[in-house]
Amino acid sequence: MFIISHFLIGISQVLNVAINLLWWLIIIRALISWVNPDPFNPIVQFLYKTTEPFLMPFRRIILAWKIGIDLSPIFAILALLFLRYFLVNILIDLARMIK
């Protein structure tokens, strides 16, 4: 049980870092979009390629509203915060109960 407990804590910490990284990438992409970036810039391409798979489901939902503003980064950040506070904490609590 000791090994499983530490394995779950390790998974929760890696998941927490991945969520934080994606959170910051989405914020940077939203900020860069305000200044009309060069789409051929490698940094801009990296930001688009890493964040687009996560933002696309939110864009499909928001397009149904026809509001004209891209609010998908806001909803994506809220989803990431939910995952951080819900899933990561559940894994940590589960690991503590197994110990």
Image: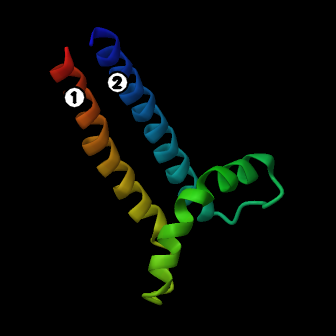
Q: Residue at x 25, y 27 (%)?
A: 92
For the residue pair 33 and 75, the one nearer the viewer reads as 75
Amino acid type indicated by mark 2:
Leu
Of pointers 2 and 1, the one earlier in the residue sequence: 2
Give the residue at mark 2. 8
**For numbered disc 1, what is the local secondary structure?**
helix
Q: Badge 2, how many Cα within 10 Å: few under 14, some, many 20+?
A: many
Image position, residue 38 (x, y; %): 78, 60
Image quarter in which the N terminus is found: top left
Residue type, label 1: Leu
Label of residue 40 in the image: none
User: What numbered label is drawn on residue 94?
Assistant: 1
Crowding around mark 1 (Cα neighbors within 10 Å: few <14, some 14 to 19, many 20+) is: some
* Percent x, y of residue 91: 28, 32
Q: Is residue 97 left or right of residue 84?
A: left
- Image x and y of residue 25, in percent: 55, 47
**Residue 57 in the figure: left or right of residue 87:** right
Q: Is residue 30 above or below residue 2?
A: below
